[in-house]
């Protein structure tokens, strides 16, 4: 309860410990936000590359299959 009394104090002062605690919490939040944004950016770029590779692989497979179907149709007629 002393903790709440210090926060709700009408004196307008915070103890040094409270200031350090708040500063540490802000510092941790900034570090986490930095790593989150850099990781999100790299994952976004990697997923874009993989999506393009998958699209190209599907396109190549479709071209191969249709080419074989055309070859079979030509050999039958």
Image (cartoon, rainbow, N blue to C red):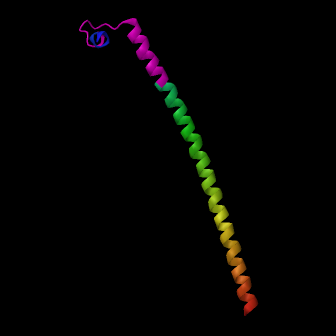
- Rendering quarter of residue 63: bottom right
Q: Position of residue 33 (x, y in %)?
A: 49, 30
- Rendering quarter of residue 72: bottom right
Viewer-proximal residue among 44 and 24: 24
- Quarter placement of the N terminus: top left
Which residue appears at 63% of the width and 53% of the height? 50
In the current view of this chain or complex, which residue is farthest to the left?
Answer: 10
Q: Is residue 61 left or right of residue 48?
A: right
Segment tinted magenta in the rendering: 6-28
- Quarter placement of the C terminus: bottom right
Q: Is residue 70 left or right of residue 9?
A: right
Count how many numbered circles sit on residues in the image: 0
Q: Is residue 28 above or below residue 4?
A: below
> Is residue 26 rendered magenta in the image?
yes
Q: Position of residue 6 (x, y in %)?
A: 30, 9
> Is residue 41 rendered magenta in the image?
no
Which residue appears at 70% of the width and 83% of the height? 70
Which residue appears at 69% of the width and 67% of the height? 60
- Rendering quarter of residue 25: top left
Q: Is residue 15 above or below residue 44?
A: above
Which residue appears at 67% of the width and 77% of the height? 66
Dominant SS of magenta comes to: helix
Q: Is residue 75 above or below residue 43?
A: below
């Amino acid at each position: 309860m002393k903790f709440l009394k210090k926060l709700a104090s009408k004196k307008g002062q915070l103890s040094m410990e409270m200031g350090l605690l708040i500063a540490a919490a802000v510092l941790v939040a900034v570090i986490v936000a930095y790593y989150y944004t850099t990781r999100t950016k790299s994952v976004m770029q990697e997923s874009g590359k993989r999506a393009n590779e998958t699209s190209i692989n599907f396109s190549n497979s479709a071209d191969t299959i249709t080419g074989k179907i055309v070859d079979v149709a030509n050999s039958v007629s």
